[in-house]
Image: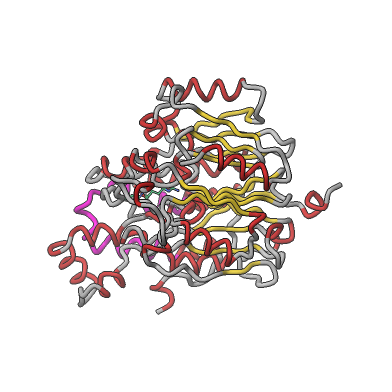
């Protein structure tokens, strides 16, 4: 038996719970779904239940599933830092009147997309044998720039044991080190417990890059320099890393993260032909460094157009391994509604050259309308049996936790939230009492600003 098998590595997908202030504010430039749905009425309760139902399906299918809590919103501290003062009521009322766009930003439930929470290197790849974490600075947008501080606290609370887990500081929150976390990072390996090669995909080179190779319409949210810094923090060597540029035309078509156009798992890389600026060089570099044969699964533009890729989120699916090496593709419902995409998925299942044997369709529409598919909602952490044992809190989903979280959502969440409702001081109070109760359910101690005083 190989050492990795005896160490019992498994990938745990930590999904972000959809927060009580989930709303549609059109905040994310370059994210077509967010830009086109701004102003719609959201249903936070339905969003949270859809997320929990996805987690439960994966648990029932035999996968290890974790949960990460939402963040404290509205972020009144952020409004105070911007000059709004007085009681919470006064701060909210004045912000709603004078700067409604700021109020919407500090209410965003965007921490649900935990693929952007940070980058993770499993212990099997790190020189010190610990799992490494760097929260992403998310400096590209104001509403997401508010996340990393609490994200760091939550990760440190759950992955607390310093014998097993190492936490790094957020990269400088400045355009040169723009970092969006695991959404632009894919680990390729024979199986989760075997050494892996880390594919970091960036949109722009900050120092000395050629502007001709940058997107023209929408921002590139990840820089090469940020990816290199994270790899350095985690102790990854040149032999373990590949840095590839995203295709600038893909970013301009609405592919704001690499996980909107490619997904990898084990030795499989499922990608659209427009994913990388230099497709061949990217595959060659992976093949040279990987200890196991790469299984590239390429989807050409004739099969799925860029528009269909972006609207269906085919590539924002989760690709998950069963113990026999076969894989399940977890796709959003939108894939089933698109003929070309659904046909492509059927072809993938029938093709003999890849281990994808099953497709699971999940309805995460509340999140999808903001540009967040199944893969956005989860942070992958490959953990050995000892590391899973060393987790703090009650964050691994089982039937009892699922039932408690469902009841918690049903008790605390509204089923309707229009942008104008965000100024309601009652919403802020409801959210605090919900989150206070949640930290008790998850047993993670005090992680929110209102709990820390
Ligand atoms: O950063 N949407 C998120 C979606 C993130 C998806 N994550 C991954 N692809 N991994 C974003 O663009 C929209 C919020 C609003 O418009 O209200 C938003 O932030």
- Residue range (magenta): 407-436
Q: Where is residue 238, by image quadrant?
A: bottom right
Q: In the figure, is residue 38 to the left or right of 345?
A: left
Whether residue 169 is in magenta: the answer is no
Q: Residue furthest left?
A: 97
Rendered location of residue 240, percent (x, y):
65, 54
How far across and down, in percent of the image, does residue 367 sit?
Answer: 39, 44
Q: Quadrant of residue 63?
A: top right
Q: Residue at x 41, y 53 (%)?
A: 204
Q: How is the image coloured?
A: secondary structure
Q: 55 or 83: which is nearer to us?
A: 83
In this view of the protein, which residue sits in the foreground, 273 or 190?
Answer: 273
Quadrant including the C terminus: bottom left
Q: Is residue 415 above or below residue 435?
A: above
- Give the residue furthest to the right: 1
Is 245 situated left or right of 211 in this image?
Answer: right
Q: Main secondary structure of the magenta part?
A: helix
Q: Is residue 434 magenta?
A: yes
Q: Residue at x 13, y 64 (%)?
A: 98
Residue at x 65%, y 29% (from the top left corner)? 354
In the image, residue 46 sits, relative to residue 442, either above or below, namely above
Looking at the image, the residue that sits furthest to the bottom is 453
Query: Would residue 81 be visible to someone looking at this image?
Result: yes
Which percent across, then down, holds residue 401? 57, 52
Residue drawn at (49%, 67%) of the image? 152
Residue 400 visible in the picture: no
Across and down, in percent, residue 22 comes to 34, 51
* As drawn, 350 above or below 4: above
Tell me how many marks there are: 0
């Amino acid at each position: 038996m190989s050492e990795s098998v005896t160490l019992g590595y498994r990938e745990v997908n930590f999904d972000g719970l959809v927060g009580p202030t989930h709303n549609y504010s059109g905040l994310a430039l370059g994210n077509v779904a967010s830009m086109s749905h701004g102003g719609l009425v959201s249903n936070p309760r339905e969003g949270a239940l859809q997320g929990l139902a996805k987690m439960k399906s994966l648990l029932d299918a035999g996968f290890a599933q974790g949960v990460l809590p939402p963040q404290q919103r509205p972020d009144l501290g952020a409004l105070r830092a911007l000059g709004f003062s007085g009681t919470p009521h006064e701060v909210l009322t004045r912000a709603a009147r004078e700067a409604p766009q700021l109020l919407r930003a500090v209410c965003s439930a965007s921490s649900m997309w935990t693929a952007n929470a940070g980058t993770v290197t499993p212990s099997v790849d790190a020189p010190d044998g610990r799992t490494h974490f760097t929260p992403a600075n998310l400096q590209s947008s104001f509403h997401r720039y508010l996340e990393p501080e609490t994200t760091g606290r939550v990760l440190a609370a759950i992955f607390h044991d310093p014998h097993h887990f190492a936490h790094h500081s957020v990269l400088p929150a400045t355009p040169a080190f723009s970092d969006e976390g695991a959404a632009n990072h894919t680990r390729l390996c024979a199986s989760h417990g075997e050494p892996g090669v880390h594919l970091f995909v960036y949109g722009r080179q900050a120092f000395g890059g050629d502007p001709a190779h940058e997107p023209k319409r929408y921002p590139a949210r990840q820089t090469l320099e940020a990816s290199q810094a994270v790899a350095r923090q985690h102790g990854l060597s040149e032999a373990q890393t590949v840095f590839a540029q995203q295709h600038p035309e893909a970013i301009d078509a609405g592919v704001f993260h690499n996980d909107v156009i490619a997904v990898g798992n084990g030795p499989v890389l499922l990608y659209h032909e427009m994913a990388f600026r230099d497709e061949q060089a990217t595959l060659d570099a992976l093949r040279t460094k990987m200890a196991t044969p790469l299984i590239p699964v390429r989807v050409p533009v004739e099969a799925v157009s860029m528009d269909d890729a972006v609207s269906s989120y085919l590539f924002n699916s989760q690709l998950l391994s069963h113990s026999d090496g076969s894989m399940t593709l977890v796709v959003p419902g939108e894939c089933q509604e698109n003929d070309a995409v659904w046909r492509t998925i059927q072809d993938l299942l029938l093709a003999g050259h890849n281990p994808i044997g099953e497709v699971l369709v999940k309805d995460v529409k509340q999140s999808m309308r903001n540009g967040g598919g199944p893969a956005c909602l989860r942070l992958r952490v490959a953990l050995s049996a000892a590391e899973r044992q060393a987790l703090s809190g009650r964050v691994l989903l089982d039937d009892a936790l699922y039932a408690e979280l469902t009841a918690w959502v049903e008790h605390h969440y509204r089923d309707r939230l229009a942008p104008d409702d965000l100024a309601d001081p009652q919403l802020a109070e409801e959210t605090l009492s919900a989150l206070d109760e949640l930290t008790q359910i998850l047993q993670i101690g005090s992680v929110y600003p209102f709990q820390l005083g």
